[in-house]
Structure formats: C-alpha cells, structure tokens
Image (cartoon, helix red, strand yellow):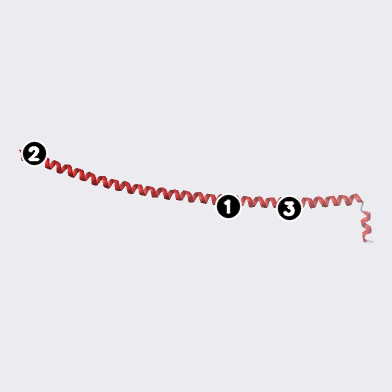
Amino acid sequence: MMTSWLKLVPSWAWLALASALSLVLVGGAQQVRVALAKVEAAQAVAAKELQAAAHEHTLGEIARAAVRQLQAQQEKRQALELRLAALDAKEHKELTDAQAENADLDFGAIETKA
C-alpha cells in the first residue's frame, strides 16, 4: 500500500529525477576533482616557493664566500705591497748610504791631493 502512491507519479518524472540526480552526482564528482586539482596546484606552488627560497639562500652563501675570498686576496696583496715597500725603503737607504760613503771617500781623496 505504501508503494501505490509511487505508481501515481508518471515515468517521465522518474526519468527526469534520475537525470537530475545523476547530474548532481557527476557535478559533485567534478567539484571534487577541481578541488583536488587546486590542492595539487597549491602544493606545487608551495614547493616552487620553497625551492626558490633555497636557491636564493644558496646564491647568498656563494656571494658571501666570494666576498670572503676577495677580502683574503686583498689582505694578502696589501701584505705583499707592505713587504715590497719595506724592502724598497731598505734598498734605497743602503744605496743612499753607499753613495754618501763614496762621496765622502771621493772628497777625502780630493783633499789629500790638494
């Protein structure tokens, strides 16, 4: 007796209801697929951002290492320049002392002749 009222509904209505229900189910499944795709896209973006941050950090480390290396080379160069300047000053002093001694010897030789 309970199912007798179902017979009062025309078959086209049942067909329309079944079609609408299948559209809702298919649409829901499509929405689930779209939501999953959005999640995957967000994860890919996050991974790319993490990779970019790691790359930026690596580039920074390389730049800092290059600066340290350049500073060390400049310090070595400055030390060599100071050593060279000290050696030049020593050699110049020895030369001027020898020239002065030669001049004194030449002047002494001239005085003894006179």
**Of label 1 and label 3, which has the lower sequence position?**
3
Screen quadrant of the C terminus: top left
Mark 1 and mark 3: Cα distance apart in space: 27 Å
* Disc 1 secondary structure class: helix
* Residue 55: % across, % down: 54, 50
* Disc 2 secondary structure class: helix
Q: Is residue 99 left or right of residue 111?
A: right
**Of label 1 and label 2, which has the lower sequence position?**
1
Q: Amino acid at mark 3?
A: Val
Say if 103 sits above or below 6 in the image.
above
Instruction: Identify which residue, 106 or 1, lies in the foreground.
Output: 106
Mark 1 and mark 2: Cα distance apart in space: 89 Å
Q: Is residue 59 left or right of residue 33?
A: left
Q: Amino acid at mark 1?
A: Leu
Q: Amino acid at mark 2?
A: Ile
* Residue 83: % across, % down: 30, 48
Q: What residue is shown with label 3?
A: 32
Task: Tell how many labels.
Answer: 3
* Residue 1: % across, % down: 95, 61
Q: Residue at x 60, y 50 (%)?
A: 48
**Of label 2 and label 3, which has the lower sequence position?**
3
Residue 110 is tagged as 2
Q: What residue is shown with label 1?
A: 50
Q: Residue at x 88, y 50 (%)?
A: 15
Mark 2 and mark 3: Cα distance apart in space: 115 Å
